[in-house]
């Protein structure tokens, strides 16, 4: 059996407990926790209560990647369970919903800022 490395991670790095992050209420039954990330990427966890739907059509100027952690996500007529990975190309849109409740982990590239845009 190979010896496991005991080398600690090289700074800078950060560890957080997702459930300790204060959630942002996006809409009825939809909570988002913004995770530490870089200027180029936004990482998040979304919890949707049973019977909820994202409150608007979500448009992705720069794309989005989503992983279903637990529960079931409904996209159109497709039901996606734990372990499902969704890739939304730039310019795509969707309005997810759930009947059972779902926890999602996602990453959005941040669109490049134009001169004069607010950060």
Image: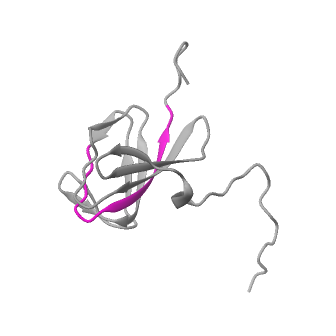
Q: Is residue 81 left or right of residue 114?
A: left
Who is closer to the viewer here, 67 or 98? Answer: 98
Please state, as top left, top right, bottom left or bottom right, where the C terminus lies in the image. Answer: top right
- Judged from this view, the residue extending furthest toward the bottom is 1
Residue 117 vs 15, above or below: the answer is above
Residue, x 26% and y 38% (percent of image)?
57
Residue, x 47% and y 41% (percent of image)?
108
Who is closer to the viewer here, 3 or 6? Answer: 6
Is 10 inside the magenta-drawn segment? no
Residue 99 on image: x %, y %: 22, 62
Residue 56 on image: x %, y %: 26, 38
Residue, x 81% and y 72% (percent of image)?
6
Residue 22 on image: x %, y %: 51, 50
Q: Give the range drawn in magenta.
A: 95-110
Residue, x 22% and y 58% (percent of image)?
51
**How many tags in the picture?**
0
Q: Is residue 117 left or right of residue 36?
A: left
Q: In this view, does 31 lie to the left or right of 17?
A: left
Please state, as top left, top right, bottom left or bottom right, where the N terminus lies in the image. Answer: bottom right
Q: Is residue 52 left or right of residue 26?
A: left
Who is closer to the viewer here, 45 or 80? Answer: 45
Is 101 inside the magenta-drawn segment? yes
- Judged from this view, the residue extending furthest toward the left is 77
Structure colour scheme:
one colour
- Judged from this view, the residue extending furthest toward the top is 116
Residue 100 on image: x %, y %: 26, 65
Q: Quadrant of residue 103?
A: bottom left
């Amino acid at each position: 059996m190979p010896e496991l490395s005991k080398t600690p991670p090289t700074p800078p790095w950060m560890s957080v407990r997702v459930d300790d992050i204060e959630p942002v209420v996006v809409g009825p039954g939809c909570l988002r926790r913004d995770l530490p990330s870089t200027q180029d990427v936004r990482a998040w966890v979304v919890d949707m209560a049973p019977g909820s739907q994202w409150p608007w059509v979500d448009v992705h100027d720069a794309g989005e990647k989503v992983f279903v952690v637990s529960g079931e996500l409904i996209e159109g007529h497709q039901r996606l369970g734990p372990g499902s990975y969704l890739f939304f190309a730039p310019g795509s849109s969707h309005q997810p919903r759930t009947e059972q409740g779902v926890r999602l982990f996602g990453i959005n590239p941040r669109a490049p800022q134009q001169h004069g845009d607010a950060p």
